[in-house]
Amino acid sequence: MKIIATDKAPGAIGPYSQGYEVNGFLYTSGQIPVIPATGEIPEGIAAQAEQSCRNVGAILEAAGSGFEKVIKTTCFLADMGDFAAFNEVYAQYFVSRPARSCVAVKELPKGVLCEVEAIAVK
């Protein structure tokens, strides 16, 4: 097992790692839309979805993988009313159309609107 860490994605805000590589598979932790360089959170679902996807991408890249190698994602929305707007952004990144679960949750860390996690091959 190998821990994946990069300063191009937000640092963990709890006792967990940004990602793990195990037997050729990469598992990312859920990525919220924190801008790594500033710690700021953009406003609105489109901007937050964009940043969450960028953060996932940074972890994939640090592990030697990429969006085209993602086989499964789990997406969390604070409001299912944001589903269509979230999908518009998501589709620009996850062009291989991986398997996906997308659920609404009561709330997310730091009051963000979305969170994305991924499983990919190396």
Image (spheres, rainbow, N blue to C red):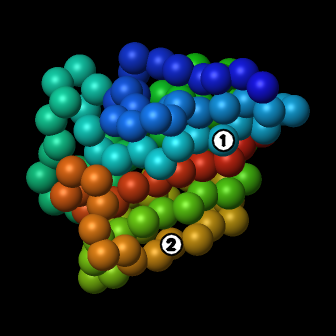
Q: Quarter holding the C terminus?
A: top right
Give the alpha-carbon distance from disc 2 to disc 1, as whole Å: 17 Å
Say which element carries label 1.
strand
Give percent across and percent down for residue 27. Answer: 66, 41
Observer-side mark, 2 or 1, equals 1
Comparing 68 with 1, the one in front is 1
Residue at 64% in and 23% down: 3
Comparing 9 with 82, the one in front is 9
Q: Is residue 51 left or right of residue 56?
A: left
Comparing 109 with 86, the one in front is 109
Q: Which residue is mark 1?
A: 27
Give percent across and percent down for residue 57. Answer: 50, 35
The amino acid type of the residue labelled 1 equals Tyr
In the image, is residue 34 above or below residue 102?
above
In the image, is residue 34 above or below residue 71?
above
Give percent across and percent down for residue 48. Answer: 26, 52
Q: Are marks 2 and 1 in contact (CB under 8 Å)?
A: no
Q: Is residue 51 left or right of residue 91?
A: left
Instruction: Determine crowd level at label 1: few under 14, some 14-19, many 20+ residues with C-alpha closer than 10 A.
Output: many
Q: Residue furthest bottom?
A: 81
Q: Is residue 32 left or right of residue 68?
A: left
Q: Residue furthest right?
A: 23
Mark with earlier residue (2, 1): 1
In the image, is residue 62 above or below residue 21?
above
Residue at 29% in and 45% down: 33
Residue at 68% in and 57% down: 72
In the image, is residue 121 above or below residue 71?
above
Q: Using the rendered view, name the quadrant where residue 22 is placed.
A: top right
Say which element carries label 2.
strand
Label placed on residue 102: 2
